[in-house]
Image (cartoon, rainbow, N blue to C red):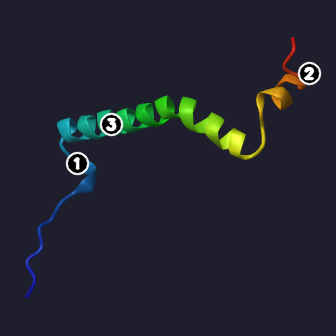
Amino acid sequence: MTDAIDVDINQSDPDSRKTRIIAAGGILGALAASTCCIVPLILFSLGVSGVWIGNLTALEP
C-alpha cells in the first residue's frame, strides 16, 4: 500500500509563487551582473582583443 498526498500544482499558494518569482529574478540579476567579468574573459580567450575590436568600422557611427 502507498499513501499519496494529492497536491494540485496549479492551485499553489500565491505567496509561494511570489517567492519563486523573486528568487528567479535574483538569480537572473546575479547572472546579468557577472557578465561584465565573464564575457571579456571569454572573448579574450577566443582571441578577440581591443585592437581587433578597434578595427571594426561598423561600430564607428
Q: Earlier in the sequence, mark 1 or mark 3?
A: 1
Which circle marks residue 23 in the picture?
none
Pointer 2 with pointer 1, Cβ within 8 A = no
Between discs 2 and 3, the one toward the N terminus: 3
Residue furthest toward the bottom? 1
Residue at the disc numbered 2: 57
How far from the left and from the top, in percent, is residue 58? 89, 22
Looking at numbered disc 2 in the image, what kind of residue is underneath it?
A: Thr
* Identity of the residue drawn at 47% across and 37% down: 31
Toward which corner of the image does residue 30 lie, by quadrant? top left
Discs 1/3, front? 3
Q: Which residue is mark 1?
A: 11
Q: Position of residue 32 (x, y in %)?
A: 50, 32
Give the structural element (helix, strand or loop) at label 3: helix
Identify the image quadrant of the N terminus. Answer: bottom left
* Disc marking residue 21: 3
Give how far apart the Cα atoms at labels 2 and 3 are: 42 Å
- Spatial distance from mark 2 to mark 1, Cα to Cα? 55 Å
Q: What amino acid is at disc 1?
A: Gln
In this view of the protein, which residue sits in the foreground, 3 or 31?
Answer: 31
| Residue type, mark 3 in image | Ile
- Quarter-of-image position of residue 4: bottom left
Mark 1 to mark 3: distance in Å?
16 Å
In this rendering, which labeled residue sits more in front, label 2 or label 3? 2
